[in-house]
Image (cartoon, grey):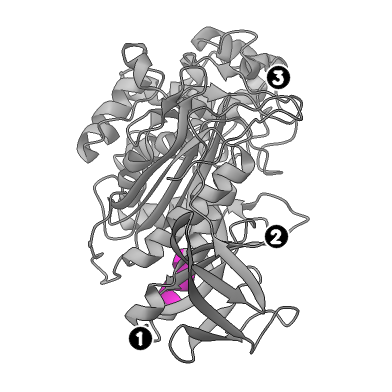
């Protein structure tokens, strides 16, 4: 696990080691519990990662352990790069947000030609999401080239008037890629390389699949929603749709890239332009005011009262999610290699744990070394509980839940190896003792036992998806627990 001690320009320190250990344990368990083949998780501030961890398996067929430098298809994260490139051109006066797309792409039919670039950025252009034949998403045909993309867009036309509704469109963002090529006179991939990748020193990021690095990619895997066994899924070139979904990267590179979108870092865009890019223009679900929204190539959402921007990505076999707090520069990036990978839920859970640690640290608590020594994972027939030191407080974490602090208790020292549950759910054992004792058996080493609310809980090693992971038929010994 890579950790550091960086501090942002605003003085916000990174989480301490016990907090990152709690994050690591929770993520590993959630991946094991959901039988996700593998994942990368990176966290950083100021564009510098202080946590970078790989979990599980990069390729189930080859039984390849995941590494932090395995490449992922980051799919719709691509839209943040495309929007950033376009906004650079706007700031340079080379293109206008209110330009009709037909001004730059005259081969578009009249119905599409008057859609403004701003509307394509915001997904309010009224274009179809993926076209009338979108089976390229299932690898039943190739992703469209430039001429095929224009034909796909013209055939689909508009499903609503420009500016009427938020309607996410991969076709629209792919057209923005063609506009960037027209304005710059470069291929989209070269423009990305010159304007973003090289200035930030990104070593593992490209606009599309890099065949020369085929062995560096984490394999994609199918889902379990209609099967009992995963299969690997091939990587393909996305051609003219690279601007919408083609990019490849790593979690650590994404920490660097999204860190450059924090306020105070103007290597890519001015703070003024970033504020315009990151403001919420549309709500993604008008029926749900808390659903989050969209800006210019950025998803906007709130987690535990903190406003984040970023993006998710869904590519055949890879599901990804990155969150940025643009004020502090905190970035959380989670990449998974299954089409049902829980990247968004993992990123949100990590954000909650980090927020709780910051809240507790601000209260200047002091936790004794004896109390810290009792952190770890414990199990009974009823539950699995992580005891963690978060910001100077001993807290329980529920690794079996997607909201890790749901029903969490706060433990207060009440003597040697004795604590009281002083805050928590009233259905639990609030104001009852928690004790720790050491058991000695002839057949195993001494180990700590926790008595929690009167119930004995024994240590449980961290669980990870082992290299031998296969999801077999019901009744098979499909999963093997291994100690990390």
Mark nearer the N terminus (3 vs 1): 3
Horizontal side of residue 318 vs 407, given as left or right:
left
Of the 4 image quadrants, the one containing the C terminus is top left
Give the number of the disc on residue 156.
3
The secondary structure type at the circle numbered 1 is loop
The residue mark sitting in front, 3 or 1, is 1
Q: Mark 2 near mark 3, Cβ–Cβ under 8 Å?
A: no
Mark nearer the N terminus (2 vs 1): 1
Q: Circle 2 is placed at which residue position?
A: 381
Task: Give residue 188's position: percent from left, percent from top.
Answer: 37, 22
Question: What separation in Å lies between label 3 and label 1 (alpha carbons)?
Answer: 62 Å
Crowding near the residue tagged with mark 2, few <14, some 14–19, many ≥20 C-alpha atoms within 10 Å: few
Give the number of the disc on residue 366.
1
| Region of the chain picked out in magenta, as a range | 354-359
- Outermost residue on the front side: it is 442
On screen, 86 above or below 245? below
On screen, 212 above or below 458? above
Task: State whether the magenta stretch is mostly helix, strand or loop.
Answer: helix
């Amino acid at each position: 696990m890579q950790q550091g001690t960086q501090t942002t320009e605003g003085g916000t320190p990174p989480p301490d080691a016990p907090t990152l250990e709690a994050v690591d344990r929770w993520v590993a368990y959630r991946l094991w519990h959901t039988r996700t083949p593998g994942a990368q998780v990176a966290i950083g501030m100021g564009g510098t990662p202080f946590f970078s961890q790989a979990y599980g398996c990069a390729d189930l067929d080859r039984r390849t352990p995941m590494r932090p430098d395995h490449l992922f298809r980051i799919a719709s994260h691509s839209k943040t790069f495309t929007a950033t490139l376009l906004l650079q051109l706007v700031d340079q006066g080379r293109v206008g947000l209110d330009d009709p797309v037909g001004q730059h792409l005259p081969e578009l039919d009249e119905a599409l030609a008057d859609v403004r670039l701003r509307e394509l950025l915001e997904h309010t252009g009224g274009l179809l999401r993926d076209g009338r034949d979108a089976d390229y998403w299932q690898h039943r045909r190739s992703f469209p080239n430039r001429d095929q993309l224009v034909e796909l867009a013209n055939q689909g036309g508009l499903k609503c008037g420009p500016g009427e509704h938020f309607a996410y469109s991969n076709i629209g963002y792919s057209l923005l890629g063609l506009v960037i090529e027209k304005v710059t006179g470069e291929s989209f991939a070269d423009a990305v390389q010159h304007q973003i990748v090289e200035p930030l020193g990104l070593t593992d990021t490209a606009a599309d699949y890099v065949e020369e690095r085929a062995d560096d990619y984490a394999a994609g895997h199918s889902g379990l929603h209609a099967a009992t066994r995963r299969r690997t899924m091939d990587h393909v070139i996305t051609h003219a749709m690279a601007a919408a979904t083609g990019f490849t990267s790593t979690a650590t590179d994404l920490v660097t890239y999204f860190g450059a979108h924090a306020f105070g870092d103007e290597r890519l865009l001015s703070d003024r332009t970033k504020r315009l890019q990151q403001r919420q223009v549309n709500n993604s679900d008008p029926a749900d005011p808390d659903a989050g929204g969209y800006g210019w190539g950025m998803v906007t959402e709130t987690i535990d009262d903190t406003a984040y921007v970023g993006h998710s990505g869904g590519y055949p076999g890879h599901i990804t999610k990155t969150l940025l707090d643009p004020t502090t520069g905190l970035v959380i990036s989670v990449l998974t290699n299954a089409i049902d990978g829980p990247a968004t839920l993992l990123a949100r859970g990590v954000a909650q744990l980090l927020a709780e640690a910051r809240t507790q640290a601000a209260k200047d608590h002091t936790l004794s070394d004896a109390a810290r020594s009792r952190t770890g994972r414990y199990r009974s027939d009823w539950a699995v509980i992580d005891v963690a030191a978060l910001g100077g407080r001993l807290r329980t974490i529920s690794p079996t839940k997607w909201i890790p602090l749901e029903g969490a208790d706060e433990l207060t020292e009440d003597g040697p190896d004795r604590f009281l549950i002083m805050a928590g759910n009233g259905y639990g054992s609030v104001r009852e003792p928690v004790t720790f004792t050491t058991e000695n058996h002839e057949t195993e080493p001494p180990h700590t036992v926790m008595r929690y609310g009167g119930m004995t809980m024994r240590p449980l090693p961290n669980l990870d998806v082992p290299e031998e992971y296969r999801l077999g038929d019901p009744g098979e010994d499909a999963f093997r627990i291994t100690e990390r």
